[in-house]
Amino acid sequence: MTLVSGWGRFPVVDSDVLRPRSFEAVGEAVAAMSGCVARGNGRAYGDAGIGAVRTIAMTGFDRVRSFDPATGRIRLEAGMLLSDLIDTFGPRGFLPFVVPGTRFVSIGGAIAADVHGKNHHCEGGFGRYVESILLRTGQGETIEASRDQNADAFFATVGGMGLTGVILEATIRLRPVETGWIRERVISAADLDAAMRALEASASATYSVAWIDCAAGGSNLGRSLIYLGEHAGADELAVSAERFPVGQDSSLAMPIDFPSMTLNRYSIRAFNELYYRMGARRAGGSHVVSLFPYFFPLDSIGGWNRIYGKRGFLQHQCVIPEKGARDVLGEILARVAKRGDASFLAVLKKLGQGDGVLSFPLPGYTLALDFPLRADILNFLDEIDRLVVAAGGRLYLAKDARQSRATFEAGYPALQRFNAIRKSLDPAGNIRSKLSQRLLDEV
Amino acid sequence: MTSRKSVLVLGGSSDIGRTAARAFAKAGYDVALAGRDIAALEPDAADLRARYNVDVGVFKFDVLDTASFEGFAGGLPALPDVVISIVGLLGVQERAQSDLAHATTIMRSNYEGPSLILGLFAEKFLGRGNGTLVGVSSVAGDRGRASNYVYGSAKAGFSAFLSGLRARASRSGVHVVTVKPGFVRTKMTESMKLIGPLTVEAGVVGDAILQAVERKTDVVYVSGKWRLVMLIIKALPEAVFKKLRF
């Protein structure tokens, strides 16, 4: 047994980690034991990527099976990382249509969480660009699932948190791009109303996201920097610029666990104040930036999760339906500002409709907050959850380590349909994660 | 015919072999992957073609079948610019201490086969006047240790072969690189307890090999820390060293 955790380093639990070398060995691992789930690069924050008993490590499966430059269609093994995909096919003029806030996620993980990016409001999530999935079900079958073939399995696997089986391969469509640069425009918003208005007004921007200063309260509550982006054409680059920028490795790495004192209300407030002022100075004009800092600002700091200390941290990401979002978001932000220890990672963004049965997105606003793990945080978040549920919202499973069954069930009305599909693919219940034990499995 | 450079990877389906092939293909080399099981090499060949749009061929090569070496080398469509030998077998030290057949296999897989095949290509390269030979040896060959001296002694022999070959070729256009990876996370070392700070991912070794070929480095310790560690281990007096059980 090995101690395993997600990116948030909470919870840390025992699981038997297996690294199969062939798809046959994956099948044997699934069949041999009840309680397996596949794990990609371990970037789910909580317990989604940890098997109830056994965790199947998939990152060794990183081959490209085929690529058609005429259509941008690529078939690849599910353990390949988005970073690898971007480094390899970016210089050839192709990028994933959807990237989350880190490029260090596997393709299988991106499908399982139906990850969203800064373009969800207009282009949908990762699953929208998945054409088909090779799935090893809990029942022991290997099936190809697409919108036309095994459609139930397909839509349950997109956003299904790995619970329909092990994703072995996928065919996805890539976006043709002229360059690896983004034309960015920064807007500063003095408060939450201004931020939401700015996001509303920029609904036609391909990429949009707001960073919120969640240490600011009172009349500054919800003050934000809104980052809009469009793919830059070759003619927008400086003559000397490479068409495709080099992705920096983590040049700055967290060598140690910070003492849990490091992040306190004073250091966070000081950081946020500085960050807001520097961003506000850039507001107004537009400029061209490399896709790497634009999409993946934290990837340049290796192991940034260690800044929260050994005890780990929790990320709370909810989505609130558009109607009534303003009041609920205001209430959440006011409570967080009063508390004072939410981090510099508060992000507000508009989402559209999700594609999978259990996909997180719904039309509305999503708010993501980080909290260092402290004694009273669980109760605090339970209260926030009540606000979310009352507003018809839900929490993102890829980030979750602690929501209750009641919160989950209220937020995901398609759960019964998901359970039925899962049961048909895995009647014996071989595929089970720590997350499914906590939220879905019959007890 | 293409004018691109080409690399032959012996042991192409090993973890280090795969990453070396990727590093060279990314740099624009055409690739020949050689190994015992051609079917197992095909998915990697397809991966390289799809990723880097280079020509990739697969060839059967068994390091223990030395009689086949001449035919193997002659059967390649063209003499490559670079030959990398990654073949090797860790084996089980305890078993090798009493099982002569097992010890023989370890010695032949790590010394005899790799030396003979690189020696064969060396003659062809010297005849042509250029080419680079890369032997992936091991820090285990720097000094025989109680825990793995059968493997270590074979690697020591291979390192000595490479160093002699390098000296002989030094006035020609042929270059010889010795790579000593240290601990690498691969399927070979899966069951070993590796020391975190001294361990690298397989991809790092692939990149280091490409860099060594391009810069004409002689001996590469993939992690600089290993050069220091082995310097200390080599400097210990035998009277002290023999008491160590690592």
Image (tube, helix red, strand yellow):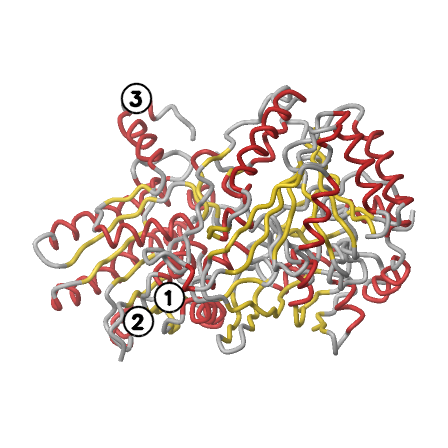
The foreground one among B24 and B246 is: B24
Q: Tell me which corner region of the image, top left, top right, bottom left or bottom right, holds residue A240.
A: bottom left
Outermost residue toward the bottom in this view? B1
Residue at image mark 2: B68
Marks 1 and 2 close (CB-CB < 8 Å): yes
Characterize the local packing of mark 3: few (<14), some (14-19) or many (20 or more) Cα atoms within 10 angstroms: few
Assign a secondary structure to mark 1: loop
Q: Secondary structure at mark 2?
A: helix
- Marked residue nearer the N-terminal end (1 or 2): 1
Q: CA distance from mark 3 to mark 2?
A: 44 Å
Q: Is residue A124 visible?
A: yes
Residue A442 position, x and y percent, is 91, 50
Q: Position of residue A247 (x, y in %)?
A: 44, 50
- Which residue type does callout 2 highlight? Ser
**Label annotation for residue B239:** 3
- The circle drawn on residue B62 is 1
Q: Which quarter shows the N terminus of chain A?
A: top right
Res A32 quadrant in image: bottom right
Residue situated in front as seen by the camera: A289 or A191: A191
User: Which dot, 3 or 1, sits closer to the camera?
Assistant: 1
Q: Is residue A368 left or right of residue B130?
A: right
